[in-house]
Image (cartoon, helix red, strand yellow):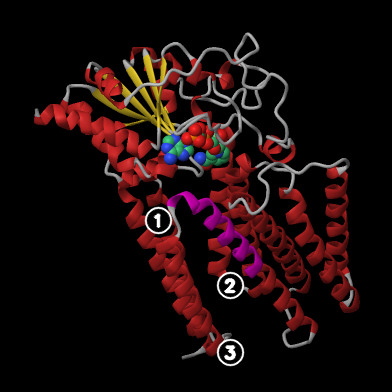
Amino acid sequence: MSHELREILINSAYIVASILFILGLKMLGRQATARRGNLISGIGMLIAIVVTLLDRHVIDYTWIAVGLVAGTIIGFACARLVKMTSMPEMVALLNGFGGLASLIVGGAEFFRIHAGTIVPAHPLFTAGAIFLAVLIGGITFTGSIYAFCKLAELLSGRPILFGGQHLVNGFLVLVTLASGVAFVAGDPSVQLLAVGGFTVVALILGWTLVMPIGGGDMPVVISMLNSLSGIAACAAGFVIGNNVLVVAGCLVGTSGVILTAIMCKAMNRSLANVLFSGFGAAPKPGAAADASGAIQGELKPISAEDTFAVLEAARQVVIIPGYGMAVSQAQHVVRELGEMLESHGAEVRFAIHPVAGRMPGHMNVLLAEASVPYEQLVEMDAINPVMPTMDVAIVIGANDVVNPAAARDKSSPIYGMPIIKAHEARTVICLKRGKGTGFSGLENQLFLMPNTRMLYGDAKGSLQSVVAEFKSLAAG
Ligand code: NAP
């Protein structure tokens, strides 16, 4: 096969793969098509990999086979073993290794050019792309490892702040830019020194940039690092002249940016506030207090039997799931409770807060897994206006996303974050294990309000007891 024909075939296959990526991404946006979207993107990736392996630039198939086998075993084991609640950690690691891969590709290509093995057609452009692949890849790698350690609680989730932190980071950025300019414009001897300089600084920067960000903001950071890993891959694609890597990197980069923006909007915070404010470092005085300045009221426990009695009489019920539902894996029994309530003539809705849980769409995924009808899911903006007409709001392991302090207490660190106004329902039943705070570490006035009752215990067990009451009524 002639060289030209081979190039045309490879690039045509890359275009097909890119179209499949885009279609797959679009289908991931809806629950009904998400599985198929995942499959279609996977087929696109398979095409891209197979075609790349046919490329004449591949010089050693042995190591590719070793990587393929090792990667398949690790990937399969992770898919089977990693729990849904640990997905953010998993994504952090995947982003980190994506960044490291781009750094290695950029570095390896530089050494091939430096040794004279290859001569780039556009030296300045290639040098710029190598700089970006190494810089962004390095920041993504160490930043993601730090984020992983915070989420896995291997390191404290508290923001680490010290005097002059922004100055130190600013200085590191300047050193990086200076060595980048020296690398792109300099001769080979300067380049060697410069590449070493910005590689080391990039690795340090990843760590120091994530250091002052609290564990509560890690999902936003991870989404941002996800975007960076895409941009690094895109730069690596330019370095080695691989079109499909450029397209895939762009898709990851832009979708990560969109997701980061959605999460910031859902928390009513700017990205700069997430990255630089040290949110969660130390509670502000009076934080989480109500408008009068203090947490007031008492916790009023309720039994499963009494919860059943309240629910039996209810006609409008809203279920508000949060991180605790994910922890106790209560989604199936939540669906069962919804069905029981409906069979007793109640109208049941599931109110979903955009940042409930620990990753975007966390609640949607769990409820879909339990086959909760999609039509019953209501967004925060749709449920809040009708909340006063709800007979009962059942809060299942949610805390921050229903904390009235976000709406009322200007001194609260979460002031301004949109919440589901569960406190406006006639009766609120909160399921949690004890007095644990939410991810922000703040107390919640909702639990002390006159219309709130606390059903203590693991959410799954508590719900099973309530469902058992409904069943015994049906049987008797
Ligand atoms: P949350 O504020 O973290 O509260 C979870 C509650 O669940 C805790 O109060 C805990 O109390 C309870 N809980 C834990 N395990 C339980 C179990 N087995 N059974 C019953 N209850 C259990 O959760 P959230 O209201 O969903 O809020 C999410 C937080 O994450 C927000 O602060 C949000 O800003 C942050 N965040 C999320 C995202 C995202 O993408 N989803 C992104 C950025 C930030 P006990 O310990 O007393 O049981």
Q: Amino acid at mark 1?
A: Leu
Q: Report the amino acid beneath label 3.
A: Ile
Residue type pointed to by label 2: Asn
Front residue of 406/126: it is 406
**Dot 3: few (<14), some (14–19), or many (≥20) neighbours within 10 Å?**
few
Which secondary structure type mostly characterizes the magenta part of the structure? Answer: helix
Please say if the residues under marks 2 and 1 sit with CB atoms less than 8 Å apart. Answer: no
State the CA–CA distance, disc 3 to disc 1.
32 Å
What residue is pinned by disc 1?
23
Ligand 1 lies under 8 Å from the Cβ of mark 1: no
Mark on residue 59?
3
Helix, strand or loop under label 2 = loop
* Residue 5 picture location, percent across and down: 48, 84
The answer to whether residue 86 is magenta is yes
Q: Position of residue 236 (x, y in %)?
A: 65, 68
What residue is pinned by disc 2? Answer: 242
Q: Residue 12, can we see it?
A: no
